[in-house]
Image (cartoon, rainbow, N blue to C red):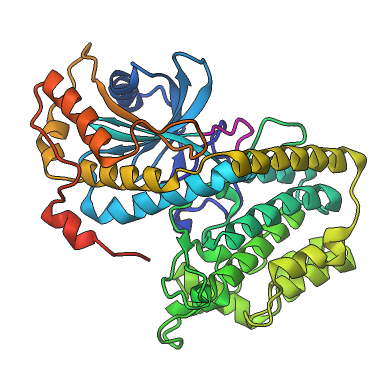
Amino acid sequence: MGCMSSKDQGPSQKASSSNKGNKYKAAESAADGKSHQKNNDVTQNFSQVYKVERLLGTGAEGNAWLVRDVNSDKLWALKLLKLPLPARFVQSVFREIRLQSELGEGHHNIITPEEVVLTSHYLGLVMEYAPGGSMTQYITDKFRDCGGVGLLMPEDEARYFFKQMVNAVDYCHRHQVVHRDLKLDNTLLSGHNPPYIKLCDFGFARNWDGTGEQSNMTTVIGTPDYMSPQLTAAKTGEAGKVFYDGTKADVWAMGVLLCVILIGKFPFEGDNVSSMGVTDPMKKVWVQQHRNKWDENSMLQSQLKYLSPNARDLLDKMFDLDEKNRISIQGIMEHPWYQTPMRRHFEDALGTLKQEQDEVEEKLAKGAYRSAERDAAIDNLIKLSASGDFKSKAAEPIHKGTIVPVWTRLSLRTVQPEYPLFNRDSLRACLAVQQRAHGSTPMDPTVNTKEDAEQEGRDV
């Protein structure tokens, strides 16, 4: 469903080009006529609970907005999906919300979803807002400041960000989730100084059951420049059916991120590939991956001389073409470059972050987990929003000045005193009351449409 941050996405060298499959393109302006119309539409849908501040981003699946809670005055990011939700999106939307809810609540370096809001026309996901923008913009600003000469930032600053990324991805893997789309655009920044990173967009994430399934994934998914050779090989016609270890694919992507953070260039890009008549983005990357080692790329030579031997050694190990030999998360944490001390400014910031993380884990340990109730209710709600019953209601125009009622708000927090809405009976009762009040046809969230049934059990 995409990420959102406070800043429009600036030029990001190659990171945000059209062939990267970004789910959201930054808004050039929220004041043009079309955006103004959408703003009115959203304002009328959510005015009971949120004041819409501005558009954050647009995409094929929906838009992202900066909103302010009318009661607490707190800023949130609101992702919207227009209803009725296409049946093909049901499983992926449910999986993204479920995985990010469970992971975000437990780790400070992962964007935390707050609630799902349902109206007659939209399904809205309310999430933690990252005021520091994206790492894409941060790197773009650094590149402009240094003029592309030398390192983008000192290695200890890069280490400060990289350590947070590794800790967040390690947390995901320990909870049997692979991200599969780690990249600059999916790494947001908090408002701290120095900023904390916040991983987002779990739309391509996948969990496994602990039986080694992470080594047997088959779906070719992600963004080409960050894909491991096991994934880019799918476009060569030589690989047959793709099997890959999702955890090692994440390690490769983190290596790409570290390289770009340090020198401002992607390790497997080159001007000699386009002349070969290769047009497919994935195949271009595959050719470059197998043509030379990353540090033999002629495009990188002017910056590589500034890298320390330990930094180059770590990247070597992360870019091993054989995923069985590629360094693990634990190996990264034990590597000399990772262990090298940083300036006091960064050490203190990580110390504070660790203290906050310990408090989160203590809270989770003492709290009452209600994830099963949450998952059941969200599953029902998403299936409801994809049902045929919503088609006629969602097609009705929203007339100017009309207040569109919020049908229900479902908290995504699993540690709290009670969950009044998180079971089928209470959800059905809540919706029935709203539907009677507004003259709607009763809808049963436990009854699936034919399209819903066809989607049951589908996963990637």
Task: Give the image quarter of residue 350.
Answer: top right
The magenta segment is 128-133
State the residue in front, 253 or 430: 430
The reply to whether residue 15 is visible in this rendering is yes
Residue visible at 33% across and 43% down? 378
Could you say where residue 315 lies in the image, as x and y percent from the top left? 75, 69
Above or below, comparing residue 217 to residue 203 in the picture: below
Q: Main secondary structure of the magenta part?
A: loop
State the residue in front, 35 or 431: 431
Residue visible at 64% across and 33% down? 132
Task: Give the image quarter of residue 340.
Answer: bottom right
* Left/right of residue 150 with respect to residue 129 in the rendered view: right
Above or below, comparing residue 357 to residue 172 in the picture: above
Q: Residue furthest top?
A: 401
* Left/right of residue 99 with respect to residue 356 in the rendered view: left
Above or below, comparing residue 261 to residue 276 in the picture: above
State the residue in front, 442 or 150: 442
Above or below, comparing residue 433 to residue 247 in the picture: above
Could you say where residue 308 lies in the image, as x and y percent from the top left? 88, 63
Q: Where's the C terminus, which quadrant?
A: bottom left
Residue visible at 52% across and 23% down? 75
Residue visible at 91% across and 40% down? 344
Give the number of callouts.
0
Task: Give the image quarter of residue 412.
Answer: top left
The reply to whether residue 269 is visible in this rendering is no
* Left/right of residue 46 with respect to residue 245 in the rendered view: left
* Left/right of residue 16 with respect to residue 142 in the rendered view: left
Residue 426 lies in the magenta stretch: no
Could you say where residue 55 lies in the image, as x and y percent from the top left? 43, 28
Could you say where residue 319 lies in the image, as x and y percent from the top left? 68, 73
